[in-house]
């Protein structure tokens, strides 16, 4: 009498599988490093989510020295910001001519993004000559009181 068994299909020995995986990994690494040309990747300084239209952006050192300032004649959208690149609808007001200086790796920075009713403050440090790591962010509401240009108060 014959009985059916649920035997597993034969498996390749573990050392053979390891060898195949190592060879495949080595081939992938060789292919990835074989490219003669390297393209520079430009990372956004700040990625902004939301439908807000911005009136200005300013980057300062922790001592209050302005490094870069952008302004818009009319509030404009900024989906992301690349250091030293002026987005459509904005003009660079500092420095007046040329690109802002490279960031100094590790330097403490404060970035302020303004919309008509709020100011966003980001405390950060330079992680490269053109990128930052944000440590904390805060949003404050601008309250207009008659002729004053706006008082900043914490947003609840």
Image: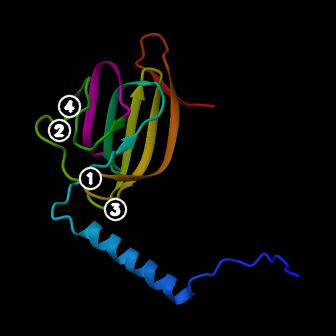
- Which residue is at the far left? 97
Measuring 35% from the left and 77% from the top, which residue is drawn there? 26
Measuring 52% from the left and 89% from the top, which residue is drawn there? 15
Give me the C-alpha separation between circle 1 and circle 3: 20 Å
Which residue lies under the disc numbered 3? 106
Measuring 47% from the left and 10% from the top, which residue is drawn there? 146
Give me the C-alpha separation between circle 4 and circle 2: 6 Å
Q: Which mark is residue 53?
A: none
Of labels 2 and 1, earlier in sequence is 1
Residue stretch in magenta: 64-79
Note whether 118 is above or below 133 in the view shown: above
Coordinates of residue 36 in the picture (x, y in percent): 15, 65
Please state which of the two labelled residues, at mark 1 or mark 3, is closer to the viewer: 1
Give me the C-alpha separation between circle 4 and circle 1: 26 Å
Q: Circle 3 sits in a helix, a strand or a loop, which is it?
A: loop
Which residue lies under the disc numbered 1? 41
Tags 4 and 1 touching, CB below 8 Å: no
Which residue lies under the disc numbered 4? 93
């Amino acid at each position: 009498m014959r009985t059916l068994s649920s035997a597993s299909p034969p498996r390749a020995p573990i050392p053979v599988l390891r060898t195949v995986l190592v060879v495949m990994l080595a081939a992938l690494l060789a292919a990835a490093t074989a490219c003669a040309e390297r393209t520079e990747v430009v990372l956004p300084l700040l990625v902004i989510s939301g439908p807000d239209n911005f009136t200005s952006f300013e980057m300062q050192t922790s001592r209050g020295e302005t490094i870069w300032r952008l302004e818009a004649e009319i509030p404009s959208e900024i989906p992301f910001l690349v250091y030293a690149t002026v987005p459509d609808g904005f003009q660079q007001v500092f420095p007046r001519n040329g690109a802002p200086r490279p960031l100094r790796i590790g330097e403490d920075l404060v970035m302020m993004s303004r919309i008509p009713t709020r100011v966003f403050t980001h405390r950060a440090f330079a992680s490269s000559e053109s990128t930052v790591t944000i440590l904390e962010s805060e949003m404050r509401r601008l309250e207009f009181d008659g002729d004053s240009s706006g008082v900043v108060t914490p947003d609840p």
